[in-house]
Amino acid sequence: MISKEKHKVAVFDINGTLYRKSSKEEFFKYICFKKGYKLLNIFQLLFFKIISKARLINQTEFKENFFNYLDNLPPEKVMQYAREYWSIEYPRYFNEKLLQRVNELRQEGVQIFCISGGLDVYMDALFEQYKTVDHYFCTKTKYTGRTYKIVGEACKGEEKVRKLDEHFKYEPYTIVEAYSDSQEVILDHADKAYLINSEGEIQDYPSDKK
């Protein structure tokens, strides 16, 4: 029986990693600017952020509630705003060292995956411009009843690993490198794992965490 060669993969988070900011918060600010949302809406969304940090709701529930500010904005309109937003942010506010590492790994034949918990309705526009990745996964949404509902689970934690497994149809693969701004499951599966600090510096992921 012929054994299949493992696919070589490098995984990059987006927010706080490749992108030096948080698109969840920054895109919210951009929509508020475009739509002139009232202060009351901001307090409501801050409330959901607080209870999420307190772990009173799960990530899927949090995202559905936090992104209520997109209600009544159809996908094509959100996409229009997202294209405007990312044209301002990319590449100015992206981590230059990581963008360089992406190019180096691609030259070595490693497949580049960007995996983010951000919603596809505004993340898709980024990857229209940033085309040096082979694949990307985001949290899937469906616009129904004038609001956005998450399809399946938010792309966080174990869901990131599951999406990779599903992509390769359970053929063997190895994550040669993984990068994130926080300790998460995907880093534990990588041969080499790195944390990006608040200054954008690359640090080794503690070996005792793997």
Image (cartoon, grey):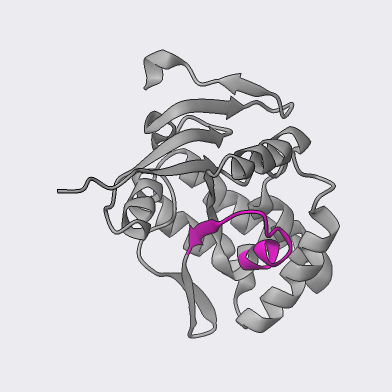
Query: Residue 141 versus residue 49: which sits nearer the camera?
Result: 141
What percent of the width, then of the height, locates residue 75?
A: 61, 80
- For the question of whether residue 183 can be seen, the reply is yes
Start and end of the magenta stretch? 124-139
In the rendered image, which quarter is residue 187 located in? Answer: top left
Q: How many numbered callouts?
A: 0
Instruction: Specify whether 147 is left or right of 44.
Output: left
Residue 99 in the magenta stretch? The answer is no
What percent of the width, then of the height, locates residue 164?
A: 38, 52
Q: Residue at x 53, y 58 (%)?
A: 135
Q: Residue at x 81, y 50 (%)?
A: 91
- Above or below: residue 190 compared with residue 10: above
Work out which quarter of the rendered image holds the C terminus and state it. top left
In the rendered image, which quarter is residue 198 located in? Answer: top right
Q: Residue at x 65, y 42 (%)?
A: 102
Instruction: Specify whether 31 is left or right of 56.
Output: right
What percent of the width, then of the height, locates residue 87?
A: 82, 62
Instruction: Specify whether 129 is left or right of 102.
Output: right
Q: Residue at x 85, y 58 (%)?
A: 88
Query: Residue 95 versus residue 72: which sits nearer the camera?
Result: 95
Instruction: Specify whether 89 is left or right of 54.
Output: right
What percent of the width, then of the height, locates residue 192?
A: 48, 26
- For the question of whether residue 36 can be seen, the reply is no
- Above or below: residue 37 compared with residue 185: below
Which residue sits furthest front? 2
Residue 130 in the magenta stretch? The answer is yes
Query: Residue 192 versus residue 155: which sits nearer the camera?
Result: 192
